[in-house]
Amino acid sequence: MSLAKPWRDLDRSTVGSAPSRYALYELGDADGDTVGFGAGVLGDELKEALAYGDAAKVRWELAESPEHAERLLGEHVEG
């Protein structure tokens, strides 16, 4: 199940403006098709995704804690 958020280009500007908070994030290809989900400290996770070229787009939902981010991840991966 995809997040109900608009896609953002996964570039240095997006990574630089991403909050340093726990979040669920969704990675997409250039066409906006989902290529994966993850959870963690958003800025760190996006830096890694950008460095590895894992995706072209990203969207996220902020979480209140690491546990909340993992719970959101479980809901989206299973849902």
Image: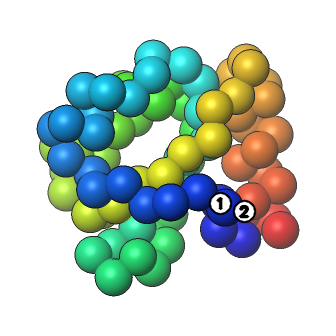
Q: Are marks 1 and 2 in contact (CB under 8 Å)?
A: no
**Left or right: 49 with respect to 7?**
left
Q: Quadrant of residue 18?
A: top left
Specify the amino acid type for callout 1: Leu
21 w.r.t. 71: above or below:
above
Which is more N-terminal, label 2 or label 1? 1
Q: Which mark's residue is nearer the viewer, 1 or 2? A: 1
19 w.r.t. 13: above or below:
above
How far apart are labels 1 and 2 at the CA level?
11 Å
How packed mark 1 is, by other alpha carbons closer than 10 Å (few <14, some 14-19, many 20 or more), is some
Residue at the spot x=19%, y=57% of the render? 53
Q: Is residue 16 visible to us here?
A: yes
Residue 75 in percent (x, y) is at 82, 55
Residue at the spot x=74%, y=20% of the render? 64
Specify the amino acid type for callout 2: Val
Residue 70 in percent (x, y) is at 73, 37
Residue at the spot x=33%, y=73% of the render? 29
- Quadrant the C terminus occupies: bottom right
Q: Is residue 54 visible to us here?
A: no
* Mark seen at residue 68: none
**Left or right: 75 with respect to 44?**
right
Residue 36 in percent (x, y) is at 50, 63
Report which residue position mark 2 lands on: 77
Residue 56 in percent (x, y) is at 26, 63
Give the number of marks: 2
**Left or right: 36 with respect to 22?**
left
Report which residue position mark 1 lands on: 3
Residue at the spot x=59%, y=57% of the render? 5
In the image, farthest residue toward the front? 6
- Quadrant the N terminus occupies: bottom right
Q: Quadrant of residue 66?
A: top right
